[in-house]
Structures are given as structure tokens and as C-alpha cells.
Amino acid sequence: MQSVAETSAAVASSDTRRKIIIDTDTATDDALAILLALFAPNIKVEAITITVGNVDFEQQAKNALYTLEIAGKGNGKIPVYRGCSRPLMRQTHGTATYIHGNDGMSDSFFPDPKQKPEAEHAVDAIIRLVEKYPGEITLVAIGPLTNIALTLLRKPSIASQINSIYFMGGCYKFYGNVTPVATYNPWVDPEAARIVFQSGIPITTAGFDISCYSSIFTDADYEEVQKLGTKLADFFLKINRIRRVFCKERQKMNGSNHPDALTMAILIDPSIGQQMLSRYVEVETQGELTRGVLVIDELGVMRKAPNATICAQADEKLFKEMVFNTLKII
């Protein structure tokens, strides 16, 4: 007869789910990305780490914890760790309350979650978990890359033990969303982004451009979400109230885009990434007009080996099916 320890070890070894850490500045779209991961049958969320970004730092942690709670996962089994509350080398950054609301959740001002953040710093948690599962952890970075860059600075050898990184940022032959050429996540902390892109860790990017092509929820889509009548559908509708208006009025979209969720969806179901391009990518840190741009060497003029896989086309139908299937669960 097997002992309890042997049985537990056997169960753990038979778990074929992909282990991930979600590094997030949790606001509206991050919350949807978290929901997709929580209910994906092939994904095991080992931890959520909070990085500088969208709204007030402590509010971001609350948003992640409340998302776990609304999903029925706020039982402490998925820990939340607070990390860097400011960029590596810059004193300030611009929050994105204009699109996410003051609380990051379209001013829903949900009650404080029952689960609390862990005392351990996010960087320490990332190092510990990667060393516990060498070669198995994928980092899903849906916020600025400050926590991951600091992890690499603290322990450079950890890079070889990280399976891969999925990063929401940049754009391929498109325009920016915080400056005419730069997207928010690398713009907030370009020095961190450069460290990560030069680390040698396999990186897959899903940019702002792909979200505009393949993740737009129109008014008709929102009507279908409302018909679901579930707790998660109601949560989705509430947290996107301000985002829907902003995307239509300011970004001239036919609805709200969901770049973080699309990034997560491509990890969960790689077939959603219809066109994946290997390119060398550098990050601009000093440009007066180009801070935070992911510079993609399309023609190979820099004569450097590709360091990133860029999603240049995604399947909108499969993405929306995943979102609807998740929102109808509870």
C-alpha cells in the first residue's frame, strides 16, 4: 500500500497542466485574463504577482484577489504576491485610470476580498517557484516587466530555468496606445523590458495591434454576455463599463479590446495564434519620442538571431468562444 506521501507525489507527477505565474497590474482586462487561466483545463496557476502599472499598487492587489474570489478560487490556494510598486529606474509612471476607472474595475468599488496578499515579495516568490519547478514555469506578463527584470537582476542564472514568457506588449506594423508608437506596458518601464528581451528566455508577444483586430467585444457581444446571466458574466459587464466607452470614443474602435486576455488565450490554445513570426526585438529606452517601443528587426538588418515570437494574426472566433465558455461557468 502506498503511503500518503507517495500517493501525493504520484498525483503531482501525473498533473500535466502547464504551470504559470501571472504577473499583472490587475485592472479590467487583466481580470479577464486571470479568469481564462483559472478555468483552463490545461493550466495550473501557481501564483499571481503584482507589478507597477494600471492603477494604485495596493488596489491592483485587491483587484487580483477579488477576481479570485468572484471565481470561487479565493481560498488561499492561489497566492498573490506584491512586487515592485515603481519602475526600475524611473520615479513615476502614468497610470491608466482613464480607461480602467479609479479602482481599475470601471469604478465598481467592489468590497475588500477576504484573502490577503502574502508577505513574501513577488521577486522572491518567482525565484522560489522557478527553482522548485525548473524548466516548467511560464511567466505570463500582462503588465510592465519590472518584477521579471528584477528577478533576472537578482539571480541571472534563473533565466535558464524559466520555461518561457508570454508578454502583452508592443505592436507589429501598427501604432501605440500611450504614445503614437509605444504601447503601455513597455513604455512604463522600458529598462525592465530591455533586460527581459535580452535575457535569452523564449518570449512570445501578443501586441495591442492583435487585440484591435481579434478581441473586440461589440455591443452585440455584450448583449450575448448579458444573456448568460452568470456571476462571471455580470462581473465582466461591470468591470468593462468605462473601458467600452473609452475604446469607442477615444480609440475609435467598434467596442472594447482585450489584449491581456488574448495573450492568455494564445497560451491556453496556441491555435488561436494563426501567424507567429520569429524576429529580433530590441527595446528603445532613450528616445525622446520613442520610449518603450519594441523595435522589430523585420528585414534582419541588425544581423541578430530572433529573440521573440510575435503573434501577427489571431483567431477572433476561437478567442471569443473561449471567453464565452469561461463566463458561462458560474
Image (cartoon, rainbow, N blue to C red):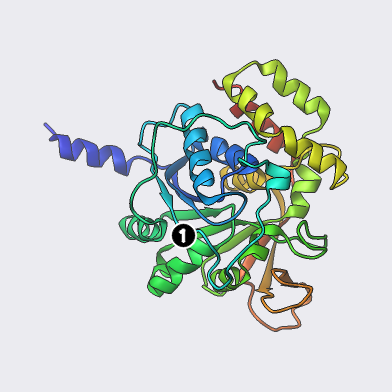
Which of 279 and 29 lies nearest the eye of the viewer?
29
Whole-percent x, y for residue 11 in the image: 29, 37
Residue in the image at 60% along x and 49% along y: 55
Q: Which quadrant of the figure contains the N terminus?
A: top left
Locate residue 124: give its quadrant: bottom left
Looking at the rendered structure, the secondary structure element under dot 1 is: loop
Whole-percent x, y for residue 211 in the image: 74, 47
Which of 206 and 243 lies nearest the eye of the viewer?
243
Whole-percent x, y for residue 304 in the image: 65, 81
Q: Which residue is mark 1?
A: 163
Structural crowding at the residue carrying mark 1, measured as other residues with C-alpha within 10 Å and reported as few (<14), some (14–19) or many (≥20)? some
In the displayed structure, does residue 50 sit left or right of residue 256?
left
Residue in the image at 62% along x and 31% along y: 108
Q: Which quadrant of the figure contains the C terminus?
A: top right
Locate residue 133: give its quadrant: bottom left
In the image, residue 7 sits, relative to residue 278, either above or below, namely: above
In the image, residue 41 sits, relative to residue 272, either above or below, namely: above
Locate residue 315: give its quadrant: top right
In the displayed structure, does residue 120 sit left or right of residue 264?
left
In the image, residue 88 sits, relative to residue 97, either above or below, namely: below
In the displayed structure, does residue 60 sit left or right of residue 124?
right
Give the amino acid at mark 1: Asn
In the image, residue 260 sits, relative to residue 330, either above or below, namely: below
